[in-house]
């Protein structure tokens, strides 16, 4: 049994922490949001009254926060409390530069540090089937893998500091682009009089096959697990996809990479979010594309 402080109990953090409880770890959850605390309690995650109480005596600290600025603020409080040898893991999805900064912040404390963003959405967090991409030293990865395995189906060591975040934003850029491609194909099929089922049967067994089609189809009735069957309730919200696409564009600009499809995907998701789709599942962009096609 490991004593784990889990900071950030939102839609992803709460079920992740709950899976650590199920695995037999001594978890102390902390979040400033009262609804988040209540949600975590429903998953049998013990809640403590303060950040310091959560961290005191912990062997592992996991943070799951909305953005880089939040991570840097929390880690500025965390690092002075950290003891030598403590394992510090950030599972947030943030910019690569901020991810690298937290590694530097903790260096003098002789802690083991990983940036470890996750993929799989709320359903994956609940089912402990996430993919976790990690960046940090071999020693930190070896220490963290047994803990992360209780929340994930696959844990990958991607390289040094910031490599986990780099893998996450590259992966989600591909996902955002592919979802738009699949949605556009179905919209075109509708205009041509081709049934959803016919296109799915062909594309799922040929060169158009991809995760956005066969696991997360934006058309209802074709893939049982798709949020399209539940009114596009996320899932993975369009606002979060937009966040990740913008992080990818920020990284591309900083690295001098040319990503025209990533840039176009970010623009389309920004328009979708602005039109009221920000809290729907990102696959709901098909409804926005139908609207554009009708203009």
Image (cartoon, rainbow, N blue to C red):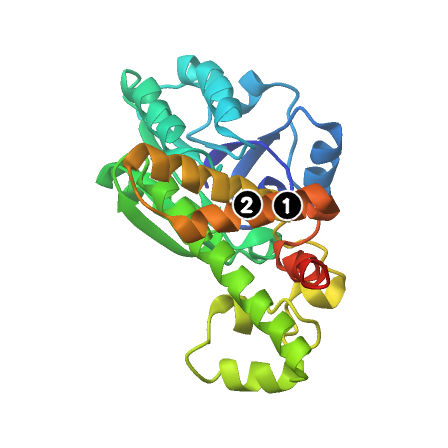
Mark 1 secondary-structure assignment:
helix
Residue beneath the point at 67% across and 71% down? 219
Residue beneath the point at 33% across and 32% down? 254
Tag 1 and tag 2, C-beta contact below 8 Å: yes
Asked if residue 26 can be seen in this view, the reply is yes
In the displayed structure, does residue 41 sit left or right of residue 109?
Answer: right
Q: Residues within 10 Å of mark 1 (few under 14, many from 20)?
A: some
- Counting from the top left corner in percent of width and height, residue 206 is at 44, 83
Looking at this rendering, what residue extends furthest in the left direction?
138
Looking at this rendering, what residue extends furthest in the front direction?
295
As drawn, 250 above or below 236: above
- Closer to the camera, 258 or 23? 258
Residue that mark 1 sits on: 271
- Counting from the top left corner in percent of width and height, residue 111 is at 31, 25
- Counting from the top left corner in percent of width and height, residue 151 is at 49, 50
As drawn, 215 above or below 237: below
Residue that mark 2 sits on: 267
Q: Residues within 10 Å of mark 2 (few under 14, many from 20)?
A: some
The answer for how far apart the CA atoms under marks 1 and 2 are is: 6 Å
In the displayed structure, does residue 284 sit left or right of residue 106?
Answer: right
Residue beneath the point at 37% across and 48% down? 259
Residue beneath the point at 72% across and 68% down? 229
- Closer to the camera, 191 or 116? 191
């Amino acid at each position: 049994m490991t004593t784990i402080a889990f900071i950030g109990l939102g839609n992803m953090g709460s079920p992740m922490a709950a899976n650590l409880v199920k695995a037999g770890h001594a978890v102390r959850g902390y979040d400033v949001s009262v609804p988040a605390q209540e949600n975590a309690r429903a998953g049998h995650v013990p809640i403590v009254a303060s950040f310091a109480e959560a961290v005191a005596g912990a062997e592992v600290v996991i943070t799951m926060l909305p953005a880089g600025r939040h991570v840097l603020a929390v880690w500025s409080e965390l690092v002075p409390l950290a003891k030598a040898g403590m394992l510090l893991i950030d599972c947030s999805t943030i910019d690569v530069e901020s991810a690298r900064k937290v590694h530097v912040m903790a260096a003098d404390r002789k802690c083991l540090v990983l940036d470890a963003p996750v993929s799989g959405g709320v359903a994956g967090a609940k089912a402990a089937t996430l993919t976790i991409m990690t960046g940090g030293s071999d020693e930190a990865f070896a220490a963290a893998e047994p803990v992360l395995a209780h929340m994930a189906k696959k844990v990958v060591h991607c390289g040094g500091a910031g490599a986990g975040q780099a893998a996450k934003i590259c992966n989600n850029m591909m996902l955002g682009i592919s979802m738009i491609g699949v949605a556009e194909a179905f919209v075109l099929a509708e205009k041509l009089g081709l049934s959803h089922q016919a296109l799915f049967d062909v594309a799922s067994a040929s060169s158009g096959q991809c995760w956005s089609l066969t696991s997360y189809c934006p058309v209802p009735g074709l893939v049982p697990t798709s949020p399209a069957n539940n009114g596009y309730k996320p899932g993975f919200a369009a606002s979060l996809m937009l966040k990740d696409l913008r992080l990818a564009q920020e990284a591309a600009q900083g690295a001098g990479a040319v990503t025209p499809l990533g840039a176009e995907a970010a623009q389309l998701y920004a328009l979708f979010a602005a039109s009221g789709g920000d809290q729907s599942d990102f696959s709901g962009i098909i409804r926005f594309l139908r609207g554009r096609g009708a203009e």
